[in-house]
Amino acid sequence: MRKGQIYEAEVIRCDYPGRGIAPLEDREVGIHGALPGQKISFRLTRKTSSKCEGLLLEVKERAQDETESDCPHFPDCGGCLYRTLSPEAELRLKEDQIRRMMEQTVVSDRPWFEGIYDSPDHTGYRNKMEFTFGDAYKGGPLSLGMHKSGSFYDIVCTENCRIVDEDFRRILSAVLDYARGTNLPYFHRLTHQGYFRHLLIRKAVYTGEILVDLVTTSQANPDLGAFAEAVLGAIPAGTGTSASGGRIAGILHTFNDSVADTIHNDRTEILRGQDFFYEKLLGLSFKITPFSFFQTNSRGAEVLYSLVRDYIGSTKDKVVFDLYSGTGTIAQILAPVAKHVTGIEIVPEAVAAARENAGLNGLDNCTFLCGDVLKVIDELKERPDLIILDPPREGIHPKAMPKILAYGVERIVYVSCKAGSLKRDLVPLQAAGYRVERMSLVNMFPGTGHIETVCLLKLPPVLSGISEPPAESAGSHDSV
């Protein structure tokens, strides 16, 4: 077995996150995107004493569960992994991946894994997309879409993407036509020269309102009125209602002169309308701005947050800490019967939105603080009865974990967008005496390799509430 050689094998299982496992001689090779039951050819790209990895070259024979993909961009576009699986087969695959992984860590003497909940929608479910300008191949015409699978530079024009609705696709095509008409180049990631960078589109599922934001450098000054007219022309009657229920709420232009290949907001101008819209979840209203965090599957988020509400149990007369609270969605869903809810979030714009949304929903028992959980938690005078953890992909900061554990609350609900981080964080949580009572998955991103995990941890009564609160710090949190 030699690195660089091409081999053929049958995939025997799929490990999280989306790595098909194929036996080769006396080793196992992980191949991203390969499915159990497929017979494939792959190139061995890495061989160490502990790990072997390969690059999928060709599917020689499909798995029994596979069908034709419903998307013409699959598998060239790197956004989806499972577009050839039926919804039922995808659920089985994802459930098997997470269950096997968690069984390696969870310590429990009772049944704890409760399976997977599906998204209400499998197509057109995303309420936000960040498309990238580039070229489909070096020296090719200007393109707009998603990065090609396995490539940092090539862009697949995803004008028929299946995980967004028709409004997204029409706007993408109209903006690409406009951009090509200017003859201006895209921003080159190596030379740091060029104008067009990204197209951000957000759409509220329940109100139908759409925000369109063109992200560019400041290296040119084209007619952006023509850009706005192109967007309005993509939606019938301009600000009217499309067949997909959408109407333009705002058209924006964001300047980003950062060298990083991410959407960074140096400054945003409103070209038409406003820079926000409203979305509804579980009877509450939320104001969404271009860069505020909000779950990208609105109807799937209702499934997720209903599960969180069920797992946390009664909040009546309880003090709840919502750590890593984002725009305060979970905090506000729990607030109506709670005594008080405190949310901590490091992104100032998200905190400002959370405060405004709490007022919009008539909730006066929510407090949202801006800062790093690691630091802000030292300054809190209240002692929580319950804790919600919904951290970013990297999970809980190792130095923040002892401070959270010191409260000794009876129940913690951990919401994870990266199951590997949850698995790691379960180690100190269980070492402190917590036990996994319940765990479920929510298929928030059908067709992709991503999955949300919700875990309820409980502390035995003899251990709960006995710890001292975290020591106070002389520092102060930011105020928005």
Image (tube, rainbow, N blue to C red):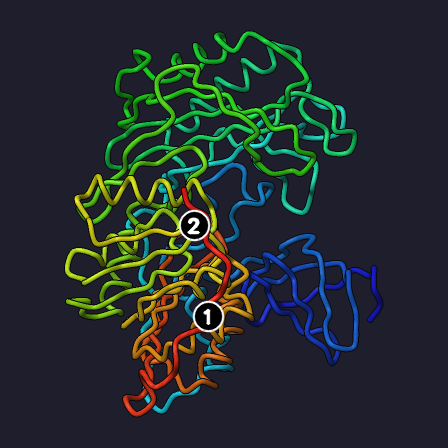
| Local secondary structure at mark 1 | helix
Does residue 90 appear in this view? Answer: no
Q: Earlier in the sequence, mark 1 or mark 2?
A: 1
Q: Can I make out residue 170 in this image?
A: yes
| Image side of residue 399 versus residue 437, left or right | right
Q: For the residues marked 1 and 2, what is the alpha-carbon distance in whole angstroms?
A: 33 Å
Residue 311 or residue 174, whichever sits in front: 311
253 to 4, vertically: above or below:
above
Q: In which quarter of the image is the C terminus?
A: top left
Residue at 50% x, 62% y: name it: 474
Q: Is residue 61 left or right of residue 419?
A: right
Q: Which amino acid does label 1 sit on?
A: Ile
User: Vertical placement of 236 versus 208: above or below?
Assistant: above
Return the x and y of residue 453 as percentages of the image width and height: 40, 65
Query: What is the number of the mark on residue 451?
Result: none
The location of residue 41, given as percent across then percent down, is: 70, 59
The disc label shown at residue 370, or none = 2
Q: Which of marks 1 and 2 is in front?
A: 2
| Res 241 quadrant in image | top left
Residue 471 in picture, x, y percent from top left = 46, 73
At mark 2, the secondary structure is strand
Q: Looking at the image, how many numbered discs can be counted on the residues?
A: 2
Q: In which quarter of the image is the N terminus?
A: bottom right
**Going 59% across and 65% down the picture, which residue do you hit?**
20
Q: Which residue lies furthest to the front in this view?
A: 474
Q: Do the residues labelled 1 and 2 touch (CB within 8 Å)?
A: no
- Say left or right for 29 vs 279: right
- Residue at image mark 1: 98
Rendered position, 216 above or below 380: above
366 lies left or right of 252: left
Residue type for callout 2 = Cys
